[in-house]
Every structure is written in structure tokens, then in C-alpha cells.
């Protein structure tokens, strides 16, 4: 079971749901989260930061490495690795995914009783359209889908 947590960005205007693969790393390893509004205030440091469509995640890579070492994990705890492998990453493919998914289910809910197979079909096609949009927009995790 992987823990999820909603994190607000530095300016407090936006938030993202964060996933913690295997609960390996505690939330504070993500030192700072910047949304596109507040990211310009963030220093750029590729050794500790990862940018994704205007958002910036800043990691405590040294502490993350300690957790990796304790578990005997071989890879280097780089920002790209932590993000791409889901150790501290978006829940879903982008910061707003949780909400998009919830809205989609709410919107299609009336169909559940009317036509369940149509409901499943629409759920799938609309979600795939959403993912295609994320991919086209350049979201990092969506590129792998
Ligand atoms: Zn912000």
C-alpha cells in the first residue's frame, strides 16, 4: 500500500497529490514544491531538482540516498530516478490527475444505472483523451504511457 499525500506549493496557490512508492521515503525528502506561479523564485539546481511542465520538485537527494543505502538499493537517488520510479512523484501523471479522475467519475455517474457498458467505455475513452492531452503538453510521466 502506497501512501498518498496532498502537498501545497511554496506560494500556496496550487497543490499536487504526491505518491510514495513502497513508502520508502518520508514526505520531507521533497524539500520544496513549486507550481508554475512560484517556480520562477526557485534556484535551478539539476542535482536536486526536477522540472515538469512548469512545476519544480526539489529533493533532499543526500537523505534519499541514505534511505536507498539502508535498503540496499543500488541506483543513485537522483531527482530523475526518484520521480520516474515513483518514490516521490505525482500521484498519477500530473499534479491535477486525482481531481480530473474524480470529476470524470462524478460526471459519468448517472450512466452507471442507465448503461453500464457505455459508462465503462466512456470512462476509458475520456481518460485516454486526458492522458493524450497530458502527453501532448509534455508532462514527463505521460511520455512513458
Ligand atoms: Zn505556487
Image (cartoon, helix red, strand yellow):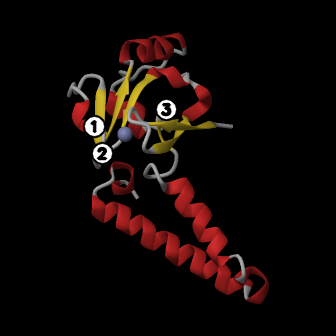
Q: Left or right: 109 with respect to 13?
A: right
Is the residue 28 above or below the residue 87 in the image? above
Q: Earlier in the sequence, mark 3 or mark 1?
A: 1
Residue 87 numbered mark, or none: 3
Label 2: few (<14), some or many (≥20) within 10 Å? Answer: some
Residue 39 numbered mark, or none: 1
Quadrant position of ligand 1 = top left
Q: CA distance from mark 2 to mark 1?
A: 5 Å
**How many numbered marks have been drawn onto this rendered protein structure?**
3
Residue 30, given in percent of the width and then of the height, sits at 44, 26
Mark 3–mark 1 CB contact (< 8 Å)? no
Residue 120, given in percent of the width and then of the height, sits at 65, 78
Front residue of 28 and 12: 12
- The residue located at (65%, 86%) in the rendering is 118
Element carrying mark 3: loop
User: Residue 32 sits in which quadrant?
Assistant: top left
Amino acid at each position: 500500500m502506497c501512501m498518498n499525500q496532498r502537498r501545497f506549493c511554496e506560494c500556496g496557490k496550487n497543490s499536487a497529490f504526491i505518491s510514495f512508492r513502497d513508502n520508502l521515503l518520508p514526505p520531507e525528502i521533497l524539500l520544496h514544491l513549486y507550481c508554475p506561479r512560484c517556480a520562477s523564485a526557485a534556484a535551478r539546481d539539476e542535482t536536486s531538482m526536477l522540472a515538469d511542465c512548469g512545476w519544480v520538485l526539489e529533493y533532499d537527494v543526500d537523505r534519499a540516498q541514505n534511505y536507498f543505502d539502508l535498503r540496499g538499493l543500488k541506483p543513485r537517488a537522483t531527482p530523475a530516478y526518484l520521480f520516474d520510479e515513483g518514490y516521490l512523484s505525482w500521484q498519477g501523471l500530473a499534479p491535477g490527475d486525482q481531481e480530473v479522475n474524480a470529476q470524470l467519475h462524478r460526471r459519468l455517474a448517472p450512466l452507471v444505472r442507465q448503461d453500464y457498458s457505455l459508462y465503462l467505455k466512456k470512462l476509458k475513452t475520456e481518460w485516454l483523451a486526458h492522458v493524450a492531452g497530458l502527453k501532448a503538453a509534455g508532462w514527463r510521466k505521460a511520455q512513458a504511457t
